[in-house]
């Protein structure tokens, strides 16, 4: 018999499923982050040469690059759930978008913060109005704007729709961030950042980056689902299944 996956579109059905998935994502996140950071910090120093001035501070890239990737991916995910909510008017989709936003904002801030520490020894400054830095900063403001707008409107349905429209408008920042250093003519988009090309990264360094990125993905799943369960309980507080769940918990 085929499984009826659509039943999980209902908050009451998805709530227990999310609770069962969260421990698995925490475990996978811990394993991937430990493996990726250990390999990056201790098994790759000689890849850049012992006398290379970047030998020590280059380790920042194992946090900075995966965080920057996640900042863009999570924004796309947030917009995807927001768009599904607008088109199909599904409550859980809006809740999912709302749950993703804080994690995306954290990764964007982490990318900016680690980028500043990378910039000081590399470029001699913590900040420059480099195209990629500027567009990444605007992306952070889009996350903050989405969260602030949603919090400022008391009516939940209006808040979902207004914040979703803002998120969709901000989606233009994702391709701008990519093209800020990968435009066809580098002379027209001069930037401190070098062009991104995974094929030119040494194998051990690439493995560490991808392991940390996968760990960040698992972390994002875990934190988003935890936040989603809290949102579901808040919004469905008047429903019978929530009251029965809370009563059962109080008796335990």
Image (cartoon, rainbow, N blue to C red):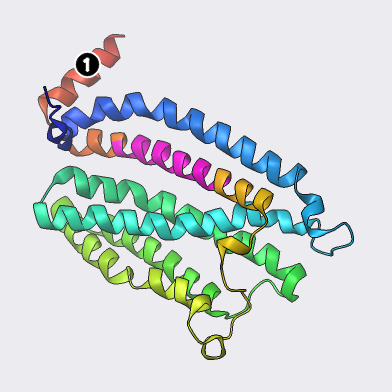
Where on the picture, by quarter, is residue 3?
Answer: top left
Where on the picture, by quarter, is residue 15?
Answer: top left
In the image as oriented, which residue stretches furthest toward the right?
51
Highlighted range, magenta:
212-228
- Is residue 237 something that shows in the picture? no
Residue located 62% across and 74% down the image: 194
197 is within the stretch colored magenta: no
Residue 228 image position (x, y, % from top left): 30, 39
Front residue of 43/217: it is 43
Up-down relation of residue 216 to residue 59 (above or below): above
State the quadrant of the N terminus: top left
Residue located 50% across and 43% down the image: 214
Residue 231 image position (x, y, % from top left): 27, 39
Mark 1 lies on residue: 247
In the image as oriented, which residue stretches furthest toward the top?
252
Residue located 56% across and 61% down the image: 198
Residue 147 image position (x, y, % from top left): 34, 57
Front residue of 48/162: it is 48
SS under mark 1: helix
Up-down relation of residue 90 to residue 20 (above or below): below
Label the magenta part by its dominant secondary structure: helix
State the quadrant of the C terminus: top left
């Amino acid at each position: 018999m085929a499984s009826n996956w659509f039943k999980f579109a209902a908050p009451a059905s998805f709530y227990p499923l999310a609770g069962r998935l969260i421990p698995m994502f925490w475990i996978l996140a811990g394993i991937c982050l430990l493996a990726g950071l250990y390999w990056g910090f201790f098994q790759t120093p000689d890849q850049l040469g012992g006398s290379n001035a970047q030998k020590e501070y280059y380790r920042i890239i194992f946090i900075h690059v995966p965080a920057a990737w996640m900042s863009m991916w999570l924004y796309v995910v947030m917009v995807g759930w927001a768009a599904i909510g607008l088109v199909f008017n599904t409550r859980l989709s809006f809740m999912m978008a709302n749950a993703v936003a804080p994690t995306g904002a954290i990764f964007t801030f982490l990318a900016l913060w680690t980028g500043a520490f990378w910039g000081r020894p590399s470029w001699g400054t913590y900040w420059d109005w480099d195209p990629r830095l500027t567009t990444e900063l605007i992306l952070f403001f889009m996350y903050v704007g989405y969260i602030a707008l949603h919090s400022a409107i008391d009516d939940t349905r209006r808040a979902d729709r207004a914040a979703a429209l803002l998120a969709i408008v901000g989606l233009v920042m994702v391709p701008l961030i990519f093209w800020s250093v990968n435009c066809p003519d580098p002379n027209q988009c001069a930037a401190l950042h070098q062009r991104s090309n995974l094929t030119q990264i040494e194998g051990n360094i690439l493995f560490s980056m991808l392991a940390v990125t996968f760990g960040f993905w698992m972390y994002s799943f875990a934190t988003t689902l935890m936040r989603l369960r809290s949102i579901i309980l808040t919004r469905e507080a008047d429903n019978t299944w929530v009251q029965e769940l809370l009563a059962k918990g109080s008796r335990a």
